[in-house]
Image (cartoon, grey):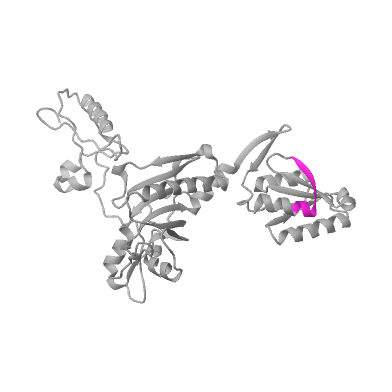
């Protein structure tokens, strides 16, 4: 607004910098319209709240934040992030149900059953993995954001003391960080994002996200939240069932607080693929390799007979393959030259290739090739089993 009348409307998506962004846009529009100051300070309003006070004519003048053009912005509409369905033969209001948007609530409702039947003492945790469903407006970026996904959550129940949760929260952040590294995520692509107080959920005391640099940008991968006792309290109040925990040491009852590490399996898989993918030049040729950690590589070992026309080599290779197959996911490949087979194994992320050659017939040793370094060593069957157990298990 100028000192006398309204000049124009601007609309900005909510962000930490929306005040400065809106001011820049407003000044630019005023200049385009030939209006000079002085101007009153810009006052931003939540459109979903202010819409009831605006006439149709006034609303038609509000520009879209995407295009900057008026007349394209639809009025706010109710939106439910949960998928609605009907249970049973009837489709009236009594049959309405919703697909779960997270796996955590099933853990909270079963807290007392698990604690009492397993005779657990606080602190302890309950973990769950399963399908979750969210009615995302814009699913995007391959499998990063989808409406149906696999989720892993752990609810770690702790004492309610004010000095207890910061220690447990910090420990779980470090534990999750170390676990992500241990399965092959590149630390140079991982970051920590600590939520500021004004961005926390109303029930949360603290939350730290582990973010990851995907090909499409840095996005949230995993969250570690201190959720307080909000969930257990709500379930107890609305069900009428006590979810108190009796501490056998102090003989006091309380509702435990919770530390919640949560991660989407699909996002984790995408992060693993991003971390593993590499291209390099080897002897003038491009080599594509998936550097999966051996513990998560889909194929642990590939067994190759050096030649395909020697029955003794083929039989020895087949016997070795069957022995390894009892413990690991293995591949037996006889097609093409040995170099081509190595390249196929590299592209599949197979960490170890075992080649049975002519020396294997006499010395009962095999050539073990390492995917990442392409170094080769000779090993006996016993040495190979010990080596693979150490590297994979």
Is residue 124 rendered to the left or right of residue 318? left
The answer to which quarter of the image holds residue 97 is bottom left
Which residue is the extreme one toward the front? Answer: 250
> Residue 350, percent across and down?
67, 49
Q: Residue at x 66, y 45 (%)?
A: 347
Is residue 336 rendered to the left or right of residue 159? right
State whether residue 20 is above or below residue 244: above
Which residue is the extreme one toward the bottom? Answer: 89
Is residue 38 rendered to the left or right of residue 382? left
Is residue 180 rendered to the left or right of residue 88? right
> Residue 71, percent across and down?
24, 41
The answer to which quarter of the image holds residue 27 is top left
State whether residue 76 is above or below residue 68: below
Q: Residue at x 68, y 45 (%)?
A: 346
Residue 337 visible? The answer is no
Which residue is the extreme one toward the left? Answer: 4
Quarter in which the C terminus is drawn = bottom right
Residue 33 visible? The answer is yes
Q: Residue at x 78, y 54 (%)?
A: 382
> Residue 172, percent across and down?
45, 49
> Residue 377, percent across and down?
78, 43
In front of the other: 201 or 156:
156
Magenta span of residues: 375-384
Count of number-bearing discs? 0
């Amino acid at each position: 607004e100028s000192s006398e009348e309204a000049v124009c409307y601007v609309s900005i998506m909510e962000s930490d910098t929306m005040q400065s962004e809106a001011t820049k846009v407003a000044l630019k529009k005023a200049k385009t319209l030939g209006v000079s100051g002085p101007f009153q300070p810009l006052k931003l309003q939540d459109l979903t709240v202010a819409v009831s006070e605006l006439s149709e004519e006034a609303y038609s003048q509000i520009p879209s934040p995407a295009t900057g053009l008026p007349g394209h912005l639809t009025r706010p509409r109710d939106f439910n992030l949960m998928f609605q369905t009907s249970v049973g033969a009837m489709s009236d209001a009594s049959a309405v149900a919703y697909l779960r948007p997270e796996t955590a609530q099933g853990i909270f409702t079963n807290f007392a059953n698990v604690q009492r039947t397993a005779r657990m003492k606080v602190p302890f945790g309950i973990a769950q993995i399963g399908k979750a469903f969210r009615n995302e407006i814009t699913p995007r970026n391959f499998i990063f954001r989808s409406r149906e996904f696999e989720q892993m959550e752990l609810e770690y129940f702790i004492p309610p003391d004010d000095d207890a949760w910061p220690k447990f929260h910090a420990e779980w952040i470090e534990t999750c960080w170390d676990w992500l590294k241990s399965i092959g995520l590149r630390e140079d692509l991982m970051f920590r994002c600590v939520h500021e107080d004004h961005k926390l959920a109303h029930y949360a005391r603290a939350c730290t996200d582990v973010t990851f640099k995907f090909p499409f940008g840095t996005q949230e991968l995993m969250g570690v939240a201190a959720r307080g006792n909000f969930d257990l309290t709500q379930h107890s109040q609305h069900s009428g069932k006590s979810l108190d925990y009796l501490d056998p040491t102090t003989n006091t009852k309380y509702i435990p607080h919770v530390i919640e590490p949560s991660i989407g399996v699909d996002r984790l898989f995408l992060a693993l693929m991003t971390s593993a993918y590499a291209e390099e030049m080897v002897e003038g040729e491009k080599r594509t390799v998936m550097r999966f950690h051996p513990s998560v590589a889909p194929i642990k070992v590939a067994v190759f007979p050096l030649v395909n026309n020697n029955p003794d080599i083929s039989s020895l290779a087949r016997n070795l393959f069957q022995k390894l197959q009892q413990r690991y996911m293995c591949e037996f490949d006889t097609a093409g030259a040995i170099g081509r087979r190595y390249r196929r194994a590299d592209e599949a992320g197979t960490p170890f290739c075992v080649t049975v050659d002519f020396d294997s017939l006499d010395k009962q040793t095999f050539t073990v090739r390492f995917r990442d370094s392409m170094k080769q060593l000779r090993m006996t069957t016993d040495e190979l089993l010990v080596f693979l157990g150490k590297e994979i298990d």
